Amino acid sequence: MALFNGKKSVLKAAIKQTTAARTNEGAKSDQLFISAYKGYAEVVKDDLVMGEALYNWGFALLHQAKAKTEEEGVKLYLEAISKFTFCLLVEPNHLGAAIDGGVAYMDLACIMDISPNDELYDLAKEFFDNAERIQRGSAAYNLACIYGLRGQEAACLEALETSKEHGSLPSEEDIVNDVDLNNIKNTQWFSEFLVELTAEPEPEVVDDSIVTYDVEGNVVGKNKKKKQPEYEVDGVVYDVEGSILRTIDDDQVEEEGKEPEAESVPEDINKPSFMGMGLKFKK
């Protein structure tokens, strides 16, 4: 009850400030409006149910606007933006509202054929910057589109790299077909960025000398791969399947400092051509 009464008093104060703002002009009026807005925001803050309802309301308006004519679409986009803005007053960290608010502004600017340097894109960027504050990388690609439209190549590349790093980058096909990036698609750095997207990852280098242990400190094995058996017949080395691996001449045998010793043929070798020919096992 005390919390309710406290919010009620804040609301009354905000209403009085609004009334006073309407009777004043210039900087004084603006300051009163700003104070009133802060009061309204404090009243509705942390109302999760209201915040979610506002977001979904704005989400519905945004997608309805996409299917309408320019005149009808403008009105619906503006309504959607107001819902996302109100949602962020209630839930300042609502990621969906922050992203979709920026999307609504960009769609609005697009259907109105506004210059990339227009204020509408600045407002979209404010929403996306807020989304990045909430979750790094969540709106990096959207920011890259704004930078691309404005020809800000360095900022565009940085935003694309951030999006890639955080796993929020669209598919290569979507990036190539995105008209917002048309201004930078012919640059060398953009081509290199696309090549990096499709490049195979470097193979992991494993140190064969590393010994692995269990939880009690006992050696359980090494990364080194087990060498497959090799067999020599008259200076020719074969694998277990009978394929020739290499040849060995007498000079090489002498350099090794020992004569190859004949060993018995393992039972799993079923090559008739090898039977009784004095196979030599190469360690």
Image: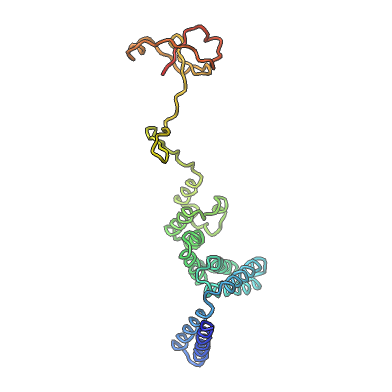
Query: Does 66 appear above or below 254?
Result: below
Q: x, y percentage for residue 96?
A: 55, 65
Apparent side of residue 97 relative to residue 260 in the rendered image (left or right)? right
Question: Which residue occupies the foreground of this view, 168 or 214?
Answer: 214
- Residue drawn where x is 56% and y is 10% of the image: 272
What residue do we see at 38% from left, 35% from top?
Answer: 211
Farthest top residue in view = 276
Farthest residue, direction front = 216
**Quadrant housing the N terminus:** bottom right
Q: Farthest residue toward the bottom? A: 23
On-image quarter of the C terminus: top left
The front one of 135 and 27 is 135
Q: Position of residue 9 (x, y in %)?
A: 51, 87
The answer to which quarter of the image holds residue 75 is: bottom right
Occupied quadrant, residue 235: top left
For the residue pair 173 and 211, the one nearer the viewer reads as 211
Q: From this view, report whether residue 249 is shown above or below residue 88.
A: above
Taking depth in this image into account, of 269 and 214 the one nearest to the observer is 214
Q: Position of residue 112 (x, y in %)?
A: 59, 70
